[in-house]
Structures are given as structure tokens and as C-alpha cells.
Amino acid sequence: MGFHKAGFETVWANEFDKNITPTYRHNFPDTPLDDRSLFDVKSEDIPDGIDGVIGGPPCQSWSLGGAGRGFEDKRGQVLLEYIRVIQDKQPKFFVAENVKGMFAKNHKDALEIIIDKFSALGYDFTYKLLNSADYGVPQTRERVFFVGYHKDLASSFTFPEPHKKKVTLKDAIWDLKDSATPAVDKVKANDPDTLPILNHEYSTDGFSSMYMSRNRVRGWDEQSFTIQAGGRQAPLHPSSPRMVKVGPDTHIFGDGPSRRLSVREAARIQTFPDSYEFLYSNVNFGYKMIGNAVPVDFAYAIAKSIADEIIK
């Protein structure tokens, strides 16, 4: 969505999670979607003559909150397949996005391998840790962007300057505060025709001990915590009272009603337009799609710089 906003057109896409592909096809009906694992996609199956390759290879293998197995996890190896596609298609540019955990000490050797492989592709290559809150997104979300320009372009990517004004939760979701609907039986989707606003429903499932280890509420005049890929990790709505610390890594809810952000509120915080409809039977898949996405306006900032610099 961010690259489309900057004037690009998608000519081929890849997504193998069958809980996600219906939403992609619904919102991008004219874009060919290959739903095989990237391990099974041959480079010749992908169109030639493309300007760029963009993607977010799975981040769980590198996440500070996950097992951190890197290349030992097959999900981490998808990044190598992504590099293979760039090597074979030789686009003008590439962009890869991943989590801050790639910079963790235990991934030092793997990161050096990634840097060496990107550098060997024949691209002027750079990378940087950015925070989405600096680019018009009402959310603190640190992510690494790897960007390469083909050496034939004799140019290097310039990361966009941060915005001077930050967007708050009030800016993003104030108008939705009184119209959210709880999911059916904790996590089942409501009939979409009964919702006045697309996907404006929220999980009422339980909370894990990890969730209760710290405050999960940010106020209206702040940016949201990172939107994660699941309803059980969704931040609480800003109207909820701050959680109260009662012991080491233990919090309780404050006095007053609390609820999670709705799927639509999470999408707004990820800067998706309200016209983008998420299809699911379980709200957790809605949260998953949104939390795994690059915020639209975050991607737009990168895409606009590329369009201005090398796409004529």
C-alpha cells in the first residue's frame, strides 16, 4: 500500500499463508498472487524487467521477543530466498524490512552474512534502524530497512528525514472510541454486515502472564505501543486506565473499564485506509495480518524517496 501510494504498481506478489491470501486478493484484485512457499518459487516464475523487489521476510527468527534462532529457523532462511530472487532478477532497487532484533549480539554473525550477501549482489547497499513514529505513524515501532540501488544507477539511497510533528492516538482513532463491537465467543468474527465500521471489533480473550508483566496502555496524546501480530498482544485502548505495577514483572488493570484495540483501530494505527477490508473468521487473523505489515505511511516514506531519486 505504501509503494502504491508513491506511484508504484505491483506486478507480482508472494504470500503462502492461506489465512492471509484472501485479504490480499480482495484488496488487490488485479495483482497476480503466487501462494506457494518462496522456497518453491523458481526465479523464472517471476516477471522480468521489474523496477524493484520489496518484502518483509519473516521476522520471528530474529525477534528479541521470540526464540531468536536466526538462520537455524527455516523462517529465517526465507531471507536467503529473497536474496536469491534479487540476484536472479537484478532489479533497479530492493527493499527488505525486518525487526530490531537483527542487531542483537547473538545475531552478529548472521547479520554479517546478510550484509556480505547483499553487498555481493552488485548493489550500492545501505541499512538503518528507523522508528515509524518519526514518519507520520501513531506508533513507536523500530524496524531495520535494507535498501540497495543497482550499481548501474551510480546512486545511493538517502533515508528520508523524520517528520517534525508526531501523530498521536487521538489523531488516529478518536472518532472510533464509542463504536467498537466485541468479538463473538471471545475471538470469532461478527457478521460484517452488522458492523457499522469495517473490522471494528475486538478480542475479549484472556491475557497471558507475559502480557500482564508491564503496562499496556498509552494515552490519547501519545503514540501506540508496537502493534504485534496477534490479538493476545494487542495494546489496550487509550481510554483504559493505566495498568498498576504490583510486583516484579506483574501488573493489574487499573480502576475502570479496559479493552483491547479493535482490529480496525490497529489498522488505523498501522495507517491502513478504512477502505482496506480484512477478511477472517477469527479476529486473531485480523490482528496477525495488521501486526505483520509494514505501516503504510512508513513504507510510503521509503518508497517516495526511491521514486524521487531513481524512478523517472
Image (cartoon, rainbow, N blue to C red):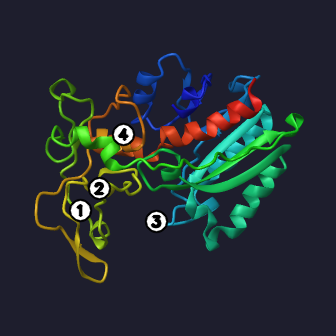
Indicate the position of residue 225 as horizontal and vertical percent values.
Answer: 38, 57
Disc 2: which residue: 232
Q: Is mark 3 on a helix, strand or loop?
A: loop
Q: Is mark 2 on a helix, strand or loop?
A: helix
Counting residues from the start of the chain, the first of labels 3 and 2 encountered is 3
Counting residues from the start of the chain, the first of labels 4 and 2 encountered is 2
Which residue is at a point 42% across and 39% down the rendered structure image? Answer: 271
Q: Nearer the viewer, mark 4 or mark 1?
A: 4
Indicate the position of residue 99 as horizontal and vertical percent values.
Answer: 55, 56
Which amino acid type is marked by label 4?
A: Arg
Disc 4: which residue: 268
Instruction: Write down the quadrant of residue 74 in the picture.
Output: bottom right
- Answer with left or right where residue 28 lies relative to residue 44: left
Which amino acid type is marked by label 1?
A: Phe
Indicate the position of residue 257 as horizontal and vertical percent values.
Answer: 12, 57
- How many angstroms separate mark 4 from mark 3 (CA)? 24 Å
Disc 3: which residue: 65
Instruction: Write down the quadrant of residue 240 in the picture.
Output: bottom left
- How many angstroms separate mark 3 from mark 2 (CA)? 14 Å
Q: Badges 3 and 2: C-beta atoms under 8 Å apart?
A: no
Q: What element carries label 1?
A: loop
Counting residues from the start of the chain, the first of labels 4 and 3 encountered is 3
Q: Classify 10 Å Cα crowding around label 3: few (below 14), some (14-19), many (20 and above).
A: few
Which amino acid type is marked by label 3?
A: Gly
Disc 1: which residue: 207
- How many angstroms separate mark 4 from mark 2 (CA)? 18 Å
Q: Which of marks 4 and 3 is in front?
A: 4
Which amino acid type is marked by label 2?
A: Arg
